[in-house]
Image: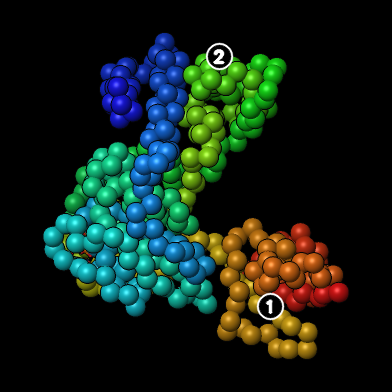
Amino acid sequence: MGILEKINSIQEELNRTQKNKATEYHIGLLKGKLARYRAQLLEPTPGGSSGGGQGFEVQKSGDARIALIGFPSVGKSSLLSKITKTKSEVASYAFTTLTSVPGVLEYNGAELQILDLPGIIQGASEGKGRGRQVIATAKTSDLILMILDATKGGDQRAILERELEAVGIRLNKEPPNIYFKVKKAGGLKFNSTAPPKHLDEKIVGSILRDYKIHNAEVLVRDENCTVEDFIDVINASHRSYIKCLYAYNKIDSVSLEEVDRLARQPYTVVISCELDLGLDDLVERIWEDLSLLRIFTKRRGEQVKFDDPMVVRSNSSVENVCDSIHRSIKDKFRYALVWGASVKYSPQKCGLSHMVADEDVVSIVTK
Ligand SMILES: Nc1nc2c(ncn2[C@@H]2O[C@H](COP(=O)(O)OP(=O)(O)OP(=O)(O)O)[C@@H](O)[C@H]2O)c(=O)[nH]1
Ligand SMILES: [K+]
Ligand SMILES: [Mg+2]
C-alpha cells in the first residue's frame, strides 16, 4: 500500500469510529499514525522530486512575508494589484494565476512582501492541482491572508483550514506547552504539572511505541493539552505555527446583513477589491498581526532619522537590533542607550538582553 492509500484508510477508519470514552484511546493511536504518514509524505524522496514541492519558491525579501491563500477566483490577484504596485493577471476563470507573484507593500517604513499564489482546491494537501507547492510556500510566510468569497457561503473556511492542517500548519495557535525529549535509555518518564484532562501515560506510551520511540521524557505543562497537541510535539519539525487573517472579498455583491455576519467571525475583515472597500483596514490589520517593531537607531552626535525606522520582529532584544545593523557590531558592544516605551528612564543604559519596544530609539555604544 502506498502512503496515500494508508492515509486514506486511516482517515476512513477515523470517520467510521464513533467518538466516546471507549474509543478515545484507539482514536488517539490512529491520529498518531496519520500524522506519521503525513510527515513521510512531506519528506523529500531521495533523488526524486521533493514531496513538499519547492516549485515556484520566490526569494524572501523585505521585513515579512504574507501569503495569499484561497480557492480559485476569490480575488487574490485583484487584491495584490490593489495594495501593491505589482500587477497580477485578473480574470473571471479559475486558475488564472499559475505561479507565485510577489509584490511589495510599503507600510509604516516597513517593506512587506505579499505573495499572490494559485488558487487551491479541496485535496490540495495530497497534491491536487498545484496545492502542495502553494501550501509549502504558505508554510514559509509570517502571516497567511486567507481570501474568501463573500458570495459563496458554505464551509470554504473550514475546508482550507483542513488542507493547511494536513501539512502541519497550525493557524492562530501557540505551540503546545509540553516538554518532550527523546532519550537513549530509561524508558518513558511521564510527568505533568497538573493532571492532564485529555492525556495519560498509557496513550502517550502507545503513540510513542508506534513511532519506535521507547525512551523519552514527557512533561505536560498545561492540563488542557490534547492527544493532537502531543502528536504535534512529536512531529515538531513538521509543524509551523502561523498567524492567519481571514478576508471576505466581494462584499459589494452580498446583503448588508451578510456582511455584518461575516465581519463578526474571529480574525476576520471584510473587503471589496472592486469598490475599494475595507482595504485600508485590511492593511492596518496585517500590520498589527505581524507585530513588527520599528526601531530608530541613533549614531553618536547625529539626529535620529524618524522617517527611516529599522524593522525587527516582536520579542526582539538589543542583541537582535545589533544583528540587524551589522553582524560584527556585537563584538565591539559596550552598552546601548535606549529612549522609549521599553525603559523607565530615557535614555537608559541597557545590555544585549534588554527587550525593545515599538518606536524605541537605540544608540549602540561600542568599544
Ligand atoms: N464583485 C466583485 N468581483 C471581484 C472582486 N474582486 C475580484 N473580483 C472578480 O473576481 C474574479 C477573479 O478575480 P482574481 O483576482 O483573478 O481571482 P484569483 O483569486 O486571483 O483567481 P485565481 O488566480 O484564478 O485563483 C475576477 O472576475 C474579478 O474581477 C470584488 O471585490 N467584487
Ligand atoms: K481568476
Ligand atoms: Mg490569481
- Where 245 sits versus 300, above or below? above
Check whether the beta carbons of the residues at disc 1 and disc 2 lie within 8 A of each other. Answer: no
Can you give x and y, in whole percent of width and height, for residue 358 in the image? Answer: 62, 69
Of 134 and 357, nearer the camera is: 134
Judge left or right: residue 221 versus residue 165. right
Of 217 and 192, nearer the camera is: 217
Report the residue at 35% width, 44% height from top: 49
Quarter of the image where the C terminus is located: bottom right
All told, the count of numbered labels is 2
Can you give x and y, in whole percent of width and height, for residue 188 in the image? Answer: 64, 18
Q: Is residue 246 visible?
A: no
What's the amino acid at mark 1?
Answer: Thr
Q: Quadrant of residue 7?
A: top left
Cα distance, mark 1 to mark 2? Answer: 54 Å
Report the residue at 62% width, 30% height from top: 180
Q: Which residue is mark 2?
A: 202
Q: Which residue is mark 1?
A: 297
Of 170 and 127, nearer the camera is: 127
Can you give x and y, in whole percent of width and height, for residue 20 in the image? Answer: 39, 15
Q: Is residue 88 visible?
A: yes
